[in-house]
Amino acid sequence: MTRWTRRDFLKASALGMGAVVVSTGLAGCVLDSNDKRNVRFTHGVASGDPLQDGVILWTRAVPDSGGAVSVGWEVATDASFESLVQSGTAEASAEHDFTIKVDARGLLPGQRYYYRFRSASQVSATGITRTLPEGNVDQVRLAVVSCAHYPAGFFNVYREIASRDDLDAVVHLGDYIYEYSSETESYAAGDADAIGRRFPPDNDRELLTLADYRGRYGIYRRDEDLQLAHQRLPFIVVWDDHEVANDTWREGADNHNADEGDFRERKLMALQAFFEWMPIRPMVEGSDEAIFRSFRFGNLVDLHMLDTRIIGRDQQLDYADYLTASGLDAARFRADVSDANRTLLGAEQLLWLQAKMAYSTGQWQVLGQQVLMGRMNLPAELLLAIATEDFSNLPQSLQALAALKARQLQGGSLSAAELARLETVAPYNLDAWDGYQYEREVVLGTARQLNKNLVVLAGDTHNAWANNLRDFEGNQIGVEFATASVSSPGLEDYLELPDELIAGAEQGIGLLVDDLDFLNISQRGYLVATFTPEQATADWHFVDTVKSRDYQVDTSRSASRRVRPGAGYRKVERLP
């Protein structure tokens, strides 16, 4: 199979972007007075990729008839648009699914702006956005989200984020859409009919074509909660696997079969739709940044957005490939999982990240990326039950192993057989950094060598986690804060745990995974990461249901952790 290159991504970006309009000042909002067609702004407005002097503005403008239509935009410092600072016109056409992007430049740093789009007949909703701050910054506050599966439940989490007035931006770590159908037997779609979250018939299938992917984004962006979040806050986004297909890697995906056509073409169409519908800048020929890119919040935070999914990822390892008649071929597995040639980021992106961290001056170096970096080693007997989906005795086994671990931590003695049960461990999730261990060591080693305060943000798992990040030698390097999902079910669903066993399972996993400090495996929610010169805090917020629009924030399960800067403090702590 032909390997994707930078030029392939440039092509996908260009197809999805069209001729992006760059605005630097007041140009008037001149619309063709002879064009009396009704234009509908069908999917609200959005902004993203904020810089100190600019931001991407997005809308979709669909005329009731005919072809392309001229649309104006305005940017102001006030909600009444009396103090205009930007204006101009752009064309919406079927070639780019009637989406419009404006790169509004020449703005002032650290400012709130209002924006809207206009046609001869309609005015869009008013959006609110912010530019990045410059110089000395006292605080940065980011909402972190991922994994929004439409048929699985309502987007109550997005509504909660939209209701806040203390956020600088939303960091979306991927799985913005899912490629599955909403048929009852499809992933997490069992309640879709009951709660009215079925896809319409013309899009209720696995996504394969450009029209399919475009249609799915359109369904998502009609959701009023997601629209509201986009309208009120700038988004900084990156893709994960479901924007293309489940467990995507560089040259294929678990959810792509030979009879579904050429995977390279499917990926190109999926990414074209992504670039059309997301408020993101296009990749530029000659630039050293692709979907991986950095955002500088003054002297406080450097946010490096990474692609751990598509650009450089080698295919995931599978335990089934190491099973022999006598059991797991542990030596061959260890050799493969730690192979120096095995890559998650790819050489180009890894070198880029190392250079960015070397030259960045922000007090906090933050990696916005998809999959868990923390070590998630579990006893082999639990992994076997999970791998074979034999969950009948899993709670009892987990409870027994946790009891052994508790006894060990309290100084009690264990038999050789008991020690073997505890110490025969392996990574739980080979789709995460645990399956790409050499490159993880390079990233952690870079942060240690440069003496950086490292905070890793993660999504993908549908659960909330706080991990200490240590290298193979046991050196404490930094921390990882992972967000729960917007609506996709978590471990409680996958492991088939009844409600009464969830707390015990969380406690047991917390005991067995050495570097794990916090987890919530059963609730949907979001993470707020707040950075100050003194500390970085993670606050997890959970909703009590996504199966109804009548929901509450479950304050009983809210949690907070922090990390302080400096070599002696870079570990997860409870707030005093």
Image (cartoon, grey):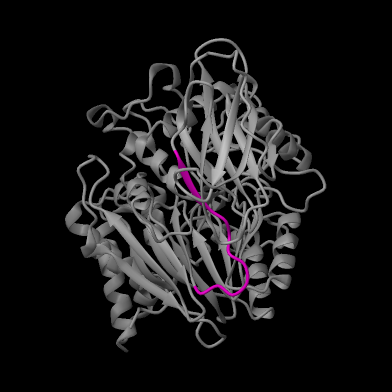
Q: Quadrant of the N terminus?
A: top right
Taking 338 as reference, is 146 above or below it?
A: above
Q: Residue at x 34, y 29 (%)?
A: 185
97 within the magenta span? no
For the question of whether residue 110 can be seen, the reply is: yes
In x, y percent, where is residue 553?
24, 55
128 within the magenta span? yes
Q: Which residues are magenta?
A: 126-138
For the question of whether residue 255 can be seen, the reply is: no
Q: Residue at x 53, y 13 (%)?
A: 36
| Along the viewing direction, whichever of 213 and 535 lies nearer the viewer | 535
| Residue at the right extreme, as displayed | 286
| Along the viewing direction, whichever of 472 and 105 lies nearer the viewer | 105
The picture quadrant where one finds residue 249 is: top right
User: In the visual, does 28 lie left or right of 382?
Assistant: right
Q: Residue at x 32, y 57 (%)?
A: 521
The picture quadrant where one finds residue 400 is: bottom left
| Residue at the left extreme, as displayed | 500
Report the predominant secondary structure element of the magenta stretch: loop
In x, y percent, where is residue 201?
39, 17
In x, y percent, where is residue 573?
40, 79
